[in-house]
Structure formats: C-alpha cells, structure tokens
Amino acid sequence: MTFRVLTAEFAHETNTFNKNLTDYAAFVDRNAYFGADAIKERGDANTEIAGFLDCGKKFGWEIVHVLSASAQPAGNVTRDAFDRLGGAIVEAAKDGKFDGILLGLHGAMVTEFDEDGEGVLLERLRAVVGPDIPIGITLDLHANVTPKMCRLANIIVSYKTYPHIDMRDRAVQAGEIMEKAMRGEVVPKTLRAHRPMLDEANGGRTDIGPMIERLEKCVAYEKEPGVLAVSINAGFGNADIQDVGPTVLVTYDAKQGNDAKHQAFAEAISDDIWEKRFDVLNYYMPVEEAAAIAKAYTRTGGPIIVADYADNPGGGGYGDSTNLLKAMLDAGITDAAFGPMVDNETALQLHKQKVGDKVKVRLGGKTDARFGGEPLELTATLKHVSDGTYTGDGPMIGGLRLSFGPSAVIEVGGIEILVVTEPAQMLDLQQFKAFGIDPAAKSVVGLKSMQHFRAAFEPIAGKVIVCDSGALCTTYYDRLPYQNVPRPIYPLDREMIR
C-alpha cells in the first residue's frame, strides 16, 4: 500500500521583547519556498524536509510538500503572515486523502493573536483532518512545548544537539514512527513534563555539561518496549508567555500503555534539570574584560573567538549592538574580524562607494540603543561590497544558499567589520569567507552568536570566550520586562521552592 503524506516546514523562534513584528516579507526575505521549489532548495541538506524525503524514498510514500518557510528570530508573527503560510498548509490538508502529516516546526512561535503559534496551526489542521490521521512534528531543542501541542500532535521529535546538527536525522526518526502509525502497528501519543524555569541552566548545550548524560538516558529509554521517541526541550526564555520553559516529552505507543512509567521517566529528567538550575557552565563576561583578554592573546594554533551571546540574531537580538566592537577598538585590537553588524542604512551607504574609499560611517546602535550601545562614529576603509549571498559548508547549514542582503566589509584600526542588511547569527565560516575575510587567519574573531558558532568555529579556534554586551538576548533575564510568564519562576525568583 502506498501512503500519501503531507509535509511542510514552518518555523519561527519569537523573541517577544523584539519590537519588530515578523511579517510575511520577513519569511520571504529569508526562506519561503513552495512545493517543488522548496524541495529543490532544501531537499538534500541538513533539513527536516530532506529527512521526510528520505523516509518517502525508503517506504515508497507519495509526498505532497506544501512549503518551507522560516524567518529570522524577531518579534511576534503577524496574523497576515501566519494565516498566509499556516493557511496554505491547512488548505492543502483539506484534500482529505492523506494518511499522515509531517511538519518541521520550531516550537517557540508566538503570534500577534496567540502565544502558541504551533498549537493554533495544529488546532486548525485537526479541524480539517479530524482526530484519527496521525500528525508528526519535529521541534527545535529550544521549543516551549505546550500541552496543546502534545494533545494535538501524535508524534513529537526534537533535536538532540546544540549546536543543531541533527535536523535531518530527527526528521527521519519522526518519519519512521509515522510509517508504523500509518500501518496501524502503533498508536503514538506524547506526554509532557515541565518545570517552572525560563530555560535550562545552560540553554540546552549538548557539547558539554549535564545534557550529555540526560540525552544518553533518553536514547537508552527509546529502546524500551513501547517507547518511540524521547525529547528534551531546553525552552526559549526570551518568550514572555505562560508556557515558557524546559520540557521533557515521551512519545509512546498507546496500545501498550505504561503511561505512568513513561511519565515517571519524564519527571525524573525534569527533576534533574530543576536540581541543576544553578550549575551554569559559561561565564558571560563584560565586553571590556573580553576585549582585554583578546588583546593579550598570543595566537597558538588558531584565533581567539569572542562570542557576544546577548546580541544573537539567532535568538531575536537586533544584531546592531556596538558595545563589543567599541571595546575591541578601545583596546587597540588588530588583525581581527568582527561580524555581523546589522545596519541597513550603513550597508546601503557603503554600496554607493568604491572599494578602497575612505568613508565616515555612523555604525550600529540604531534600533534601540538601550540594548547594546549607541552608534559608533567611525572613519573606515571600504574593503568589499556584496549582494550578501553565501552558501554554507559547515555542519549546520552546509549546502544551503542564504543571504545577509546588501553587505560590505570595512576596516577600522585593523579590525575588518562585516556590515549586513539582514540579521543572522554566525554559525558557518562562509559567513565571513564569502566576503573576503578568512577567520582562521585572524588573531581575534568577534562574532554574534549563542552556542551555534561552536560547530564551525571551535575547530579553527585556539581559544573561545563568551561575553554579554547587554543586548536584547542578555543572559541576565532580570533586565528584561517580563509581564506574562507565571510567577514564581526561575531565575526571576531565585529563592523559589517548587
């Protein structure tokens, strides 16, 4: 029997403190492809659709792919964008001839009209396809998983790596469960455990720390009878919503029962997350301290990587914080690279100049200087101009064609600065190399990223340090104006007892 499977990718990580709404154009500008075009662009890379297609080939499915759409993390998704993109998925499902639905989602989408974007999408799908067709979803490790999502999706499989390098693998895992469900071999159901925290103490990083042992236990438990998938979601603390925070999910075969056993396993992992809430691995140093360390660094085998966690465009930061760059300039650091600096106005200004020109720029700090610093008045040499396109070649985005929008490289005092139009965090060497900067050849590399940079940059690094510039993704949550999260909650209420 040939099964007919509806697939789609629709993802956004919403930073509710970001004042810029995420509209339809934001999806189109970054990644919005429909049908065959989506498969052409993303169907043989480290993506969920690639994993779904792998299962289609293995099991002989007929796959109908609706769209692949994602936007850079920013403010709430507009109703128009959600209705147009989510609506396309729901409209396709009205065909009524599908045996299963597989969706690559994020799990932390917040819309203008509802805190639970994924829950709303699933609710609309269920209204069309009914309660019996199995729906499987993959989620980012930083999902804020809600009870509604667990109730409406049969299969939930989250990434097990941070940096995220297993998107395709997790999609294959979800697809293999879907095959069993469509054959009637299993009746998948997902349960959830949750703790009152904004996120896991280390943001869910899986290269070191307690997540390694937790995930080993999860993988081992997946081999237990009736267990189909176990996921740990670290949560996304920059969402000011009710259902924020870390969760543990068990997708199991309801035919075999054992609900209490599976719930107990999930609760035990959740207890460990709670008990280790004070065990922070990183020291998020002030930018002045980071710059002093970088200035004193003697290159031995690779550059020192200075990562600004707080101005992470991958978490909804504006990407135009100037505090780290200013500290590097003030320290007299040379033989260095820095990027990205998101500044549409300056990028367009530079595109009107010629390579080699001396230019005066007012760089960065233009969105909201309260978060990360004022604009810098600089005299620079223009080194490179570009339309901003690049093709990743690293573990996370290898093979994917992406763009910073109109971009340029300027040099100020021995620091080459990548100025871009569209925000995106640094997670691939090509995000420098495509613009004439070889990060491996520098002594110091300052970049904006939270953990994901490690996949590509740690292999070339002599040393890695992290700092907090005070930008919108600050690790000091008490500096953000939370209003909607349930209280008490850690770490806003550090002395709380669960």
Image (cartoon, helix red, strand yellow):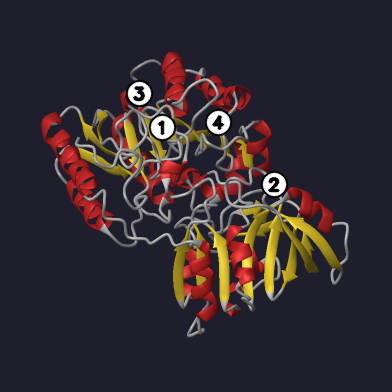
Image height of 390 relative to 421, above or below: below
Identify which amino acid the numbered label 1 is placed on.
Answer: Thr
Reading the image, the residue beneath label 2 is: 366
Q: Is residue 115 left or right of residue 263?
A: right
Which mark is first along the chain, 2 or 4?
Answer: 4
Q: What x and y, as percent, mark residue 190?
A: 27, 31
Identify which amino acid the numbered label 3 is placed on.
Answer: Lys
Q: Is residue 132 left or right of residue 355?
A: left
Q: Is residue 494 left or right of residue 297?
A: left
Q: What x and y, as percent, mark residue 240?
A: 44, 32
Name the front one of labels 1 and 4: 4
> Dot 1, how many residues are within 10 Å of its Cα: few (below 14), some (14-19), or many (20+)?
few
Which mark is first along the chain, 2 or 3?
Answer: 3
- Circles 2 and 1, Cβ within 8 Å, touching? The answer is no
Q: Nearer the viewer, residue 219 or 225?
A: 219
Reading the image, the residue beneath label 1 is: 2
Name the front one of labels 4 and 2: 2
Identify which amino acid the numbered label 2 is placed on.
Answer: Lys
Which mark is first along the chain, 3 or 1?
Answer: 1
